[in-house]
Each structure stands twice: as structure tokens, then as C-alpha cells.
Amino acid sequence: MPTISGAPWPPRPRAWLAGAALAAGVLAASGAGAQTPAPLSLSEALARAAAFDPSRAALDARVLAGQAAIRQAGLKPNPTLGVELENFAGTGAYSLVDRTESTVSYQQTLERGGKREARTVLARGQLEVARWRGAVRTLDVLRDVQVAYAEALAADAELVIADARLIAVQGAQRDVDRRVKSARDPLFAGSRAEAVTAQAEIARDEARAAAEAARARLAAYWGAGANYSLDLKLFFEVPPPVAAPTAEVADLQLLTAERDLAIAAVRVEQSKTVTDPTVRAGVRYLGQGDDVAFVVGGSIPLRRYDTNKAGVERAQAERTAAEVEIEAARLSREREIARLTRRMTASARESERIRTEVIPAAIRAVEQVRAGFTRGGFQYLDVAEAERALFDARARRLAVLRQYHLDQAALDRLTGRHAAFVTQTASAEPRR
């Protein structure tokens, strides 16, 4: 980025701001060629990331698997076809083949206790859990995108500050060089100013590399290059924290679905306590003739040892745990929302006070020290200290604003603010 070599010094009250604005303009145009792309909004970044999400195909497959599980759960047990040979290849009078008796039977297990319905409800619950897990994962990705967006804005703001600081120290170095040449300051004053300028150049280069890396990290969420611009005004805006919506977010919906799944599992285990009889009917072909006879029979398990009591108790305990987790998650969510809201309010207040109280005073100090330095009343160290105080104030405000936007991303995740960008919701059909 080119520097301003002919800027007047000491600066007028708004000169530093003008330098920062110029640095911001150069930053927005850097790498964009003749045409600067329109600034990328947060909503557009979230939409791109949601559309690109590679996990969508995996979620669609899980939904298809859940739908197949529902169809499978609704099927009754397969019948059994049996064949029996009696009096076959015996001894004595039963050594003859014509004394053999054969029976062909059809056997069917009759499910009782609502087993099929319980299995179907359980399969539907598993499908619902899979859908809400997909929604939760997508919201996590959107939160990460919002964090990356905030980091990219912060990196651009840091580059603007680094550029403005470099402009300031270059101007100071030129002034010191003139004083050294006129023997008004010793040689080491020029060397010190040169070292400060070199440090500012390194800091500017590091800030530029960090800004490029932050842009690349953000663009990686939709698999494209960092050919976009950002509106820095969005970074310096601190709107009031967004209030939590009344509807439950996907995280609580997931826990509710898991609770319903646990209830369905209890019903499945309870249905297993009811025995299933097996009925059998067939035709018997009697030996030594063409006589036939019908045979019927059946069996029913004896519940002597395994009554599935422990299975029911386990399922009931898991249902209780799921219910407790819902309440615990609600309380934890409310506490975290309150904590983030308070911290964002404090950050907004601190940022505004730095902007209106600290920075103007620091600018006046720089102007006063520079004017005194020009008259010979101060040393270069006084100028450098005043400029450092101004830079530290701006850096502190930037850090506060960065934390504000990171907290906003966390708050938006907790409140489900970006649920509209979820490409797979609990009611959506999978792509075929």
C-alpha cells in the first residue's frame, strides 16, 4: 500500500482520521483491480456457507436410512414353513419306507403387546433425532462462519490502524531527519525514528498478511477465493444485543426429540414383557396309504427367568436422564445468554467511551506535543510516546469491538438467529 509522503506535519485535528480513511480506501481497493466487488454482507456469507455445506449429503443419507427403518419396523415376523418325517428309516417294523409319515406345516408368530407399533414409533423418533442433529450441526457451521466474518473485519481494521500509524511515524521521521540535518537534534534521534518506522512497516506487513489469511479462512467455508470486499462500517457498529426468541432453538428441539426417543424405547421394552405365541397348522401324510390328516399346534414362551424387568428399568432411567438434560440445557442457555448480553453491553459502552473520550484526548496530545516538538520544546521520545498512546487507544477499541462481535456470534448461535439458513430442518425432505 502506498504511503503519503507529502502530508503536512503536525497534523490538523482531523488529519489522523483522514489518513485512516485513506488507508481504509486503499485497503478496500487492494487486490480488486479496476472494479471493487460489492461488500460481502454477513447474510450472504452465511447463505454461501449453508449452500456449500458438504455434510448435507450425509444428512440426506441418514434421513433416507431413517425412513427405511420406519418401513422395516412396521413389518410383522415372517412365517415359517416346516417339513417333518416320522418313522423314517427305523428298525424292525419301521424299517420300511412306506411306513414313513410326513407333515408339512405353516407356522406364524403372533406379536402381542403392541410390539410393531412400538418399533415404528421408535424408528420415527430416531429419524427425528437425525434431522435435528443435522440442524444443530448446520447452526454450528453458521456460527463458525460468523466468527470468521468478524475476524476478517477485525483483521481489516487492524490493517487500517497499522497503515495510519505508519503514515504518522513516517511523517515524524521526516521531521526528525530535518532537525538532525540542521543540527537541532543528535544523530541517535534520527536512528531511533528510523527504527520506529521500521517496526511500523513490519507491523503493517504482518497486519496485511493477517487480513489476507482471515479473508481466505472465511472464503474457505464456501470453497472459493477471497475475491470479495468487506464494509468496515459494520465492524464499528455496536447495535444492542439481539433478544432471545420465544421459540426453542434446534439444540432444545434435539434434546426434546431425544427425550421422546427415550419414551419410545420404554414402550418397546415394555412390549417385550408380553409373550408372543406361535401357532402352527399343517397336513400329515400317513404311511401305507393315501390317508391324510390335519394337524394344529402352538407354543408360548414361559417367562420363568427373563421377564425384561431390567430392560424396562434401564429405558425408564434413560428417559428420566433425557428429561433432566432438557431442563439443565434451558437453564444453562439462559445463563449464557444473560452473560453474553451483559458483556456485549459493557463492550459497547467501553468502545463508545474510548471513541468519544480517550481518542480525542490522545489526538489533542499528539497535536500539542508535535507543535511543541516543532518549536523545540519537546524531544522525539515525547512525540513517540504520545503517538503510542493514541495507537494503544485505537487498538484497545478494536480489541473491544472484536470481542463484541465474537460474543454476538455466540449469542446468535444460542438464540438460533440464523435458523433460516439451515438447509436441512426437521420437516425437510431429503434430496434424492
Image: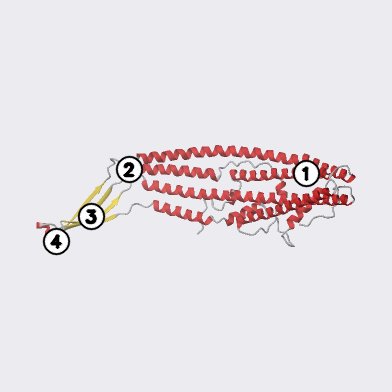
Mark nearer the viewer, 3 or 2 = 2
Q: Say what amino acid the circle numbered 4 marks.
A: Val
Residue position marked by numbered label 2 in the rendering: 274
Measuring from the top left, give residue 13's x and y in whole percent: 84, 45
Residue drawn at x 26%, y 50% is 279
- Whichever of callouts 2 and 4 sits on the residue coming sooner in the sequence is 4
82, 222: nearer the viewer = 222
Image coordinates for residue 401, horizontal then vertical, percent: 69, 44
Residue holding disc 4 = 97
Task: Specify which label sits upstream in the sequence, 2 or 1.
Answer: 2
Please report whichever mark, 1 or 4, sits nearer to the chain's N-terminal start. Answer: 4
- For marks 4 and 3, give the CA distance: 21 Å
Name the element at disc 3.
strand
Q: CA distance from mark 1 to mark 3?
A: 99 Å
Q: Is residue 168 visible?
A: no
Q: Amino acid at mark 1?
A: Leu
- Please report whichever mark, 3 or 2, sits nearer to the chain's N-terminal start: 2
Does 285 sit left or right of 408 as displayed? left
Give me the C-alpha separation between circle 1 and circle 4.
Answer: 111 Å
